[in-house]
Image (cartoon, rainbow, N blue to C red):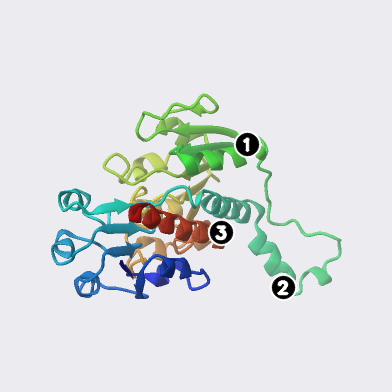
Amino acid sequence: MKIVILDRATLGFDIDMSIFETLGEVESFDVTNETQTINRVKNADIVITNKVVISKEVMDNSNLKLICISATGTNNVDLEYAKQKNIQVKNVAGYSSSSVVQLAFSMIFQIVQKLDYYKKYVDEGNWQKSQIFTHIDKPFFELDSKKVGIIGLGDIGRNFAKKAKAFDCEVMYYSTSGKNPNSEYKQVSLDELLKTCDIISIHCPLNENTKDLLNYENMKNMKNGAILLNLGRGGIINEADLAKIIDEKEIYCGIDVVAVEPILEDNPLLKVKNKQRLLLTPHIGWASIEARTRLVKMVAENIKEFLK
């Protein structure tokens, strides 16, 4: 079996990929653009892709038997056509929950604790000049008893909820599908969640129901000082509306995903004036060393299962 890896660089070069060499002949490319895809997969039996699109045209010009997506999302593969062509498609899920939630809380702590300000205060030599033992000019807060709202209570959302409860937060959630009851946490409307919660964290998929789910009209109802996190998918928050809200209202945002990645030069989030209210990271939530190691093992297991 010939295995072709199309976007090796997306998985990081600190992760051992040698397991695939035990499963077949491997050809690996760090990056593949759309003009190169057909040529690179034409002789492959198995293709591994993270974000490279496997379209109808690609499948028609190949002898693919298995498409392995090294991610949870499957929107880069024409699933219906793959089924017609009798090409199996396997993704991975559940590998990154702890990694995503850890980034979410890293963002919360940085925003709540004002660590950037206090580190800068010390680094600039101010503490040794102080007349008192402490410096508390930038107020910070405890998480205890804060209201935390989760949009999307899937595997990652439940992991986030469990850790929020450990900090004695009051947890509630909004189900974007309306089909996800959970007796452990209070289910509320999106409107109530936005109006009442101190921290709001998005962990739902992007689909017809969730595109622009958060927009100017509903985000303006958020509490002053509220923290909004998106570690789900770009497009769930309308980015132009969010940029406007950040400059109009005191809300703090941790954003790890945007609608088009890598982020475009003209993305409105890059142009907000109140930059201290926005913590923007380059889609790293999924990517702890442990999560990527799990991911590679799961892709390998998918191939082993197929080969059997």
For the view shown, which residue lies furthest in the front direction? 308
Dot label at residue 290: 3
Q: Residue at x 55, y 50 (%)?
A: 98
Q: Residue at x 40, y 61 (%)?
A: 269
Question: How far from the left and from the top, in percent, is residue 207?
Answer: 29, 44
Dot label at residue 29: none
Q: Is residue 17 visible?
A: no
Amino acid type at image mark 1:
Lys
Give the vertical position of 14 relative to 158 (above or below): below
Question: How far from the left and from the top, in percent, is residue 196?
Answer: 51, 33
Q: Nearer the viewer, mark 1 or mark 3?
A: 3
Secondary structure beneath dot 2 equals helix
Q: Residue 145's image quarter?
A: top right
Whole-Å distance between the Cαs marked 2 and 1? 34 Å
Amino acid type at image mark 3:
Glu
Secondary structure beneath dot 3 equals helix
Q: Residues within 10 Å of mark 3 (few under 14, many from 20)?
A: some
